[in-house]
Each structure stands twice: as structure tokens, then as C-alpha cells.
Amino acid sequence: MTDNGFNVSIKMDPSNGFLFGGNKDNCGTWMDKMGSSSKNKGVPATPRDGAPIELVALQYSVLSYLAELHKQEEFQFPISKVSQIEFGAWAELIRKNFEPCFYIP
């Protein structure tokens, strides 16, 4: 992986609530594969950029859990410092957009 693969900027898309980032040179998780053939040796075969479905699903789960903990007064922070949106509202934004963004008929 090149140096650019380590320069990952993560942002939230306010239209759907998904966190996204990475770049074509990023191959940094156990799910990714670095190319090994003569045509792509050292180049990510499965770059980690955009908003992968499994990470958006995990994000939804965490936000829902934090919202529930706050409701039960077991977590004092109701709003994300990153997005300035309540965890429950953020989870709902993702829930409403998940299927339209990922379902392929």
C-alpha cells in the first residue's frame, strides 16, 4: 500500500447519515486484499473507500445502542460531537436510507 493509503479522511454524508471515506489506495482491514498478481502487485484489489454496507450497518447498530443508553440515563451524551445530531435521529436517518442506497432489485 502506498503512503496515500494511510491518508484517510472520514466524513458524514448529511443526506443519508452514512460515514464515508478512504481512497483507492486504502487497503487496511482484514477484509481487504492487496494485489499479488503481476498485473496488480502492491495495489489494493479491494480498496476500502466510500461507505461499505457492513460498516454502515455497524454504524447504525452503534448509534441505536447509544440512543437507547441515553434514554435509560446510562450514557450522558445525546449528541455526536462530529455531526451535531442526536444519536437516535442519526440512526433513523441511516435506517430510512439504508435500503434505498444498498438494495439492488
Image (spheres, grey):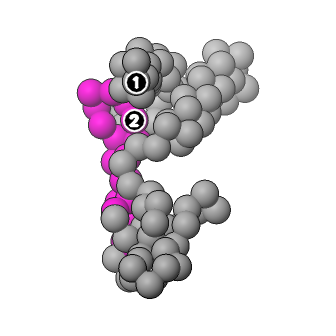
The disc labelled 1 sits on which kind of residue? Answer: Ile
Q: Mark 2 = which residue?
A: 18
Give residue 103's position: percent from left, percent from top.
Answer: 43, 23
Residue visible at 39% across and 35% down in the picture: 18
Label 2 crowd (10 A; few <14 / some 14-19 / many >=20) = many
Residue 52 among those drawn in magenta? no
Height in image: 55 above or below 47? above
The disc labelled 2 sits on which kind of residue? Answer: Phe
Residue 1 appearing in the image: no
Q: Mark 1 = which residue?
A: 104
Is disc 1 in contact with disc 2, using a CB cutoff of under 8 Å? no
Height in image: 59 above or below 24? above
Which is closer to the viewer, label 1 or label 2? 1
Residue visible at 49% across and 79% down in the picture: 37
> Which of the pair 87/48 is nearer the observer?
48
> Which of the pair 58/32 is nearer the observer?
32
Height in image: 40 above or below 52? below
Residue 99 appearing in the image: yes
Residue visible at 59% across and 36% down in the picture: 58
Please give the range of residues in magenta: 5-23
Give residue 41's position: percent from left, percent from top.
Answer: 45, 82
Closer to the chain start, of discs 1 and 2, is 2
Regarding mark 1 in the picture, which secondary structure is present there? Answer: loop
Whole-Å distance between the Cαs marked 1 and 2?
18 Å
